[in-house]
Amino acid sequence: MENSPSSAEEQPYDRVKAFLRNFRRTLKTSSFWIDGDQIFRFPSLSKDDWRKINYHVCVFYPIDEPDPYRQLRFSYQTSTSILTIRFQYSDLRQGMIEFLYNRFMLATGWPYMKIGRYQHRDVYHGEAAGSFIGADLLIRENYPLYQNELNKQIKMAIHVGCSDTYDELLENVRPWLTGFQPKPVVYVMLVKITEEPEYHCPLGDISDEEFERRGLKTADAIFAQDFVKEGKYGPVSYQGDRWTGEIKEIFWEIWKLNPETREPELVSGREFIIPEGNPQLRLHDFLSPSYASEQLSPDWEFYRTGLRFQIVDLAQRRYRVWQILREKKKMGATAE
């Protein structure tokens, strides 16, 4: 879901600040019941305005802000003067991020390895200088100063996309690979999860009469066993209405900077998780020699088995979200 907030008469800085204030208020009143991934774009935002917004975000919304607010992802591109704010509290995204986080933690086990979730960084070099980008996972080596200061750097940035198009995911590659000299990021990993068809609430503004006639269950009375899953990874429906599509494809691809052309290039071809595949990663390709014998070998069968259950839970969650938002809307109309 993508939105371009109304420009109206407000200045860009005021529009973004008002959006953050209202969005935070919505989260406090609605908790996790926000329907689907949401993407907001603010055009014509100057560098000075972005610096003020960046200060506002860092000062008033610290990183220890409780979920789901801290899952907001900010990116600002100086070349287009567009600020993009993504709220992507998606079960599919969270499942993949947590899976990769845990697998990297198990594979490394190195005292100077740091793996951070939902990280943001300013870009200081290259054509994207002045931009601000976020990643779902950042992997860093953090050696003490007396050992090797040059090794205090980001080694890999990982982006997981569901509602993002592939081209939108790809926009993250160049800033990470070119914007952090003389301590360059070695790899950027993109993970794309494709649900077909893309989710749209199948019921919308159904009337109370139709709700009663069909005998649809309330949010607190609906359970996973009420849903029907057609394939291994969906689609999933309830009373003929589709609440998730099929998870048609999941892949990762890894990018690095070509040292001669200074252009991003694929390390290898696209590697699939669905349809069934078994991508692996040699850690010493982007980490220090300490990891010469280590390899990231995720148990993808374990992940896929969990996904078969998760897709049903996702359908249940979406139905409950729809029901709760429907009731809130009715209460608001009654109050008016």
Image (cartoon, grey):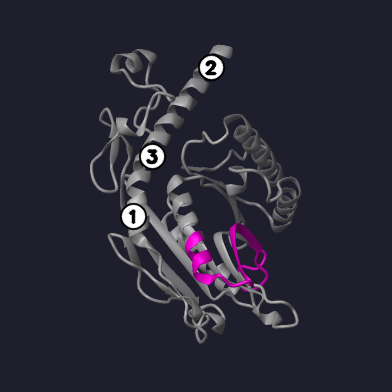
Q: Residues within 10 Å of mark 2 (few under 14, many from 20)?
A: few
Q: Is residue 127 visible?
A: no
Task: Judge whether 144 appears above or below 169 on screen.
Answer: below
First reached walking from the N terminus: tag 1 or tag 2: 1
Which residue is at a point 71% across and 46% down the rendered structure image? 61
Residue that label 1 marks:
304
Callout 3: helix, strand or loop? Answer: helix
Q: Which mark is residue 239?
A: none
- Identify the amino acid type marked 1: Arg
Q: CA distance from mark 3 to mark 2?
A: 27 Å
Depth check, mark 3 against mark 2: the one in front is 3
The part of the image, by quadrant, that contains residue 125 is bottom right
Task: Judge whether 76 appears above or below 244 on screen.
Answer: below
Who is closer to the viewer here, 119 or 167? Answer: 119
Q: Is residue 191 magenta?
A: no
Q: Residue furthest bottom?
A: 260
Q: Residues within 10 Å of mark 1 (few under 14, many from 20)?
A: some
The part of the image, by quadrant, that contains residue 180 is bottom right
Q: Are marks 3 and 1 in contact (CB under 8 Å)?
A: no
Task: Judge whether 138 appears above or below 34 on screen.
Answer: below
Depth check, mark 1 against mark 2: the one in front is 1
Q: Which contiguous range is marked in magenta?
A: 102-131
- Provide residue 288's location: percent of width, then percent of height: 57, 81
- Identify the amino acid type marked 3: Asp
